[in-house]
Image (cartoon, rainbow, N blue to C red):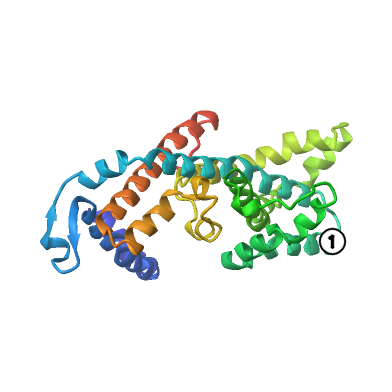
């Protein structure tokens, strides 16, 4: 205790520097956790959180036994899993390709094109998807050469996942590759020169030099991505949702929004959201242990 007090006194300026961030985190992250207790109550805005009746796991059981639970849960799991499996390797591939460009001007222009979609609003992205995939849009205009009638992409439940995932890859892959490009910048060029002299091909140099450099970064980012596998984005899923593609587009976040804010069933919606958060924590711990075994004991936790 004495050593800790002495250390704090000696480095008090550092503690003052992080104090605002710590205070804001406590106020906006930890204190609101008390509100999660309404998941175990029949919450009434008039009675408040403390005055509402305690019902235990009633809302959790209600969600787990509801007829549409399995459909909503599997939609969320499939959409987020496919998004992780397809979207995670693409930024790595882009970074490796960008790292091979030697002309800085060309590299900067390509990076600008790849990063630009990240700054487009999700609302605009969804509008663009509807515009391009509409029966009178440019995609159907091209398909009309081979097909007799237009394809209604946004009304097809089977097409929703592909539309959601690939539009997300287009929007975020370039931006996600930044951290990998930065990691590759630390690779000593002499390693590539020596490997080239020894007769190593481009793929061999990428496999034995570049990928080992990216491995720790990839491990951490994969754990974070897998830990939030159930925390799939609400905005785009809700904006791309139509009455016809509902069997595939109804996921836990959109379900929580409809039951909580639209239907006013706050306790039930909080219980569903808390259930989703618990699944995320469980997946984070499991994936971290798996990655530790595969990554020589290096993980996030």
Residue 179 appears in the rendering: no
Residue indicated by mark 1? 106
> Is 289 placed left or right of 86 in the picture?
left
- Between 44 and 19, which is closer to the camera in this rendering? 44
Please state the horizontal and vertical placement of residue 197, each as a whole percent of the image: 88, 35
Q: State the SS at label 1.
A: helix
> Is 98 placed left or right of 164 in the picture?
right
Residue shown at the point (34%, 51%) measured from the top left: 273
* Quadrant assignment, res 210: top right
Please state the horizontal and vertical placement of residue 91, each as a whole percent of the image: 67, 49
Residue shown at the point (69%, 57%) measured from the top left: 133
Residue 292 to residue 271: above or below: above
Residue shown at the point (23%, 59%) measured from the top left: 34
Residue shown at the point (63%, 42%) measured from the top left: 86
Please state the horizontal and vertical placement of residue 44, each as a whole percent of the image: 18, 63
- Between 280 and 213, which is closer to the camera in this rendering? 280
Please state the horizontal and vertical placement of residue 214, each as a whole percent of the image: 64, 43
| Image quarter (top left, top right, bottom left or bottom right) of the C terminus | top left
- Between 285 and 123, which is closer to the camera in this rendering? 123
Within 10 Å of disc 1 (Cα), the crowding (few <14, some 14-19, many 20+) is few
Residue 123 to residue 168: above or below: below
Residue 189 appears in the rendering: yes
Q: How many marks?
A: 1
> Is 87 placed left or right of 142 in the picture?
left
Seen from this angle, which residue lies furthest front? 148
């Amino acid at each position: 205790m004495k050593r800790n007090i002495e250390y704090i006194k000696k480095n008090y300026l550092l503690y003052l520097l992080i104090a605002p961030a710590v205070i804001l985190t406590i106020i906006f992250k930890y204190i609101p956790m008390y509100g999660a207790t309404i998941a175990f109550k029949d919450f009434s805005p008039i009675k408040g959180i403390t005055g509402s009746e305690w019902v235990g796991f009633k809302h959790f059981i209600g969600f787990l036994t509801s007829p549409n639970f399995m459909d909503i849960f599997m939609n969320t799991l499939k959409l987020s899993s496919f998004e992780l499996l397809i979207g995670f390797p693409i930024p790595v591939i882009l970074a490796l390709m960008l790292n091979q460009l030697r002309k800085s001007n060309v590299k900067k222009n390509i990076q600008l094109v790849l990063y630009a979609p990240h700054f487009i609003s999700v609302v605009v992205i969804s509008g663009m998807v509807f515009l391009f995939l509409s029966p009178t849009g440019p995609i159907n205009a091209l398909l009309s050469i081979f097909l007799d009638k237009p394809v209604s992409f946004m009304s097809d439940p089977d097409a929703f996942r592909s539309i959601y995932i690939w539009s997300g890859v287009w929007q975020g892959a370039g931006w996600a590759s930044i951290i990998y490009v930065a990691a590759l910048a630390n690779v000593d060029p002499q390693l590539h020169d020596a490997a080239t002299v020894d007769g190593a091909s481009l793929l061999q140099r990428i496999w034995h030099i570049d990928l080992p450099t990216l491995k720790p970064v990839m491990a951490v980012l994969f754990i974070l991505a897998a830990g939030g596998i159930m925390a799939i984005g609400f905005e785009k899923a809700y904006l791309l949702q139509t009455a016809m593609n509902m069997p595939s587009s109804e996921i836990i976040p959109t379900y929580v929004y409809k039951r909580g804010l639209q239907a006013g069933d706050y306790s039930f919606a909080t219980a569903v959201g808390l259930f989703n958060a618990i699944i995320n924590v469980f997946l984070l711990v499991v994936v971290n242990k798996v990655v530790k075994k595969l990554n020589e004991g290096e993980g996030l936790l």
